[in-house]
Image (cartoon, grey):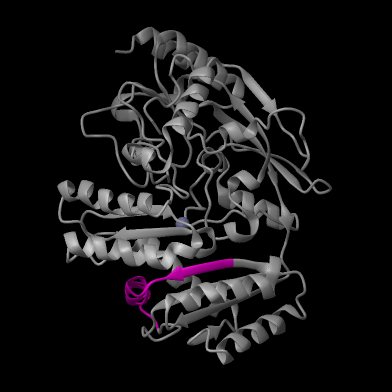
Amino acid sequence: VTSNETIAALRRIVGDRHVTTGADIAPGHLADARMAMPEGEAPAALVCPANAAEISAVLKLCRSAGLAVVPQGGMTGLAGGAVPLPGSVAVALGRLSRIEEIDTAAATMTVEAGVPLEIVQRVADDAGFLFALDLGARGSCHIGGVTATNAGGNRVLRFGMMRDLVLGIEVVLADGTIVTSLNKMMKNNAGYDLKHLFIGSEGTLGIVTRLVLRLHPKPRSVATAFCGFAKFDDVLAFLGRARAELGGTLATFEVMWPEFYRIAIEEAGRRPPLPPAFACYVLIEMMGTDSARDPEKFAAFMEQSLDDRLIADAVVAGSEVQRGAFWHIRDASSEFSRGQGIPAGFDVSVPVGDIGRFVEDVAARLAAAFPDLRPVIFGHLADGNIHVEIRRIPDERARHDIEEIVYGATRDWGGSVSAEHGIGLVKKPYLAYSRTPEEIALMRTLKTALDPDNILNPGKIF
Ligand code: ZN
């Protein structure tokens, strides 16, 4: 139970109109893209601070009042990490929305945590750079949120995950201490690299308030192809060849299994790039710096792979419109679960060489228990990251059995139950499937050291 004095004190810190309670809290702050707070439960308050100093004061107050604090970004997460706990104080970062600086010599951008990813991308582009992180929720997700969850997406193969794109960080600790570590240098071995404690910590160790982001040169050429394969082994061989021939310009290698392609072309409602006749489909993209020669190089590479029968069929995008149509097929996955009943989605990774057999194994285990499920499978192959979407599960009780099957297979293949979505609340029961007791104990040691009163996003991850 929160006393009125605590709410009044929160109002004094951030200003009256930046604290909401009860039915005044916008529903968008009660659910992420995967789950909502249970009916009848509510946070004590939603607070929208303007800067790190206000967040520090909010944390000090909540600590002394014994209130849990749940940091919130764009609420696009898929693991329940930002969903408020009953009676907690939700801290929304949306007002921290300034772009502070672009340093062209260091190739960095300094931003506040509440800037949407798409704005970061656009500002970088206007300055002649690329900010390389890209994912479907780019319009709504916050740069601080994708840092707290170490998001991945479609270009990890070339540019890495968020962890690889952050050079400096500012965080507010559970006791209100503001740690400003806005490093701009690639090399800085002066003690522990503290930013990595907070990247991917899902708001359990500190609240990210500012970031120094790493920018890349803007690519001058983009070449894209959509390919069909007779068997999955050919996809792996083609990936090996693409890495060798295209080297550092290989930016995207997205794989789709037949059920995905069938639904995607149905939803796209236009002529598909290839007939639905193959065992696997790949969207491959190279991003280079030589606008004159790159297209020829890519075309020659594709032709050779077709001649060698590594690829069964392929279309190279001849225009930006055609490239958009290929991506439209791949991005259709974000629509898959709309209006279809109760969906279930999985984000796992297994070693790349085992993916073909892992997918067969998961499909077989699911079919044995639930013959009608028809799982939709796709992923970022080079990263070992596979998504399994089930558009409609029989009922909520089946969810546990389906999770056991998919995460059990992931454990058996030595994989990770979370490739890029985090653990949050949703995957908490399965953390031990991919982490040893010693690893989890070390995570708890860190949590206790940084947040001894357990007020920052308690009950998330473990
Ligand atoms: Zn993904």
Q: Which quarter of the rendered picture does the N terminus lie within? A: top left
Could one spot residue 352 in this view of the protein?
yes
Residue 220 as seen in the image, left or right of residue 434: right
- Residue nearest the observer in this picture, 384 or 338: 384
| Image coordinates for residue 457, horizontal then vertical, percent | 42, 27
From the viewer's perspective, is 56 left or right of 439?
right
Rendered location of residue 293, percent (x, y): 76, 81
Please provide percent x and percent y for residue 107.
Answer: 77, 49
Most distant residue in the bottom direction? 307
Residue 379 appearing in the image? no
Q: Quadrant of the C terminus?
A: top left
Q: Quadrant of residue 99?
A: top right
Magenta-span inclusion, residue 259: yes
Q: Residue at x 60, y 81 (%)?
A: 319
| 184, above or below 207, in the image | below
162 or 57, which lies in front? 162
Relative side of 446 to 83, left or right: right
Rendered location of residue 158, percent (x, y): 64, 60
**Can residue 409 be found in the magenta stretch?**
no
Q: Is residue 321 left or right of residue 330?
A: right
Q: Name the residue: 17% across, 66% down.
A: 372
Is 457 above or below relative to 138? Answer: above
- Residue range corresponding to the magenta coloring: 252-270
Task: Answer above or below: position of 171 versus 300.
Answer: above
Q: Residue at x 33, y 38 (%)?
A: 27
Q: What is the count of numbered marks? A: 0
Residue 366 lies, with reference to residue 303, above or below; the image says above
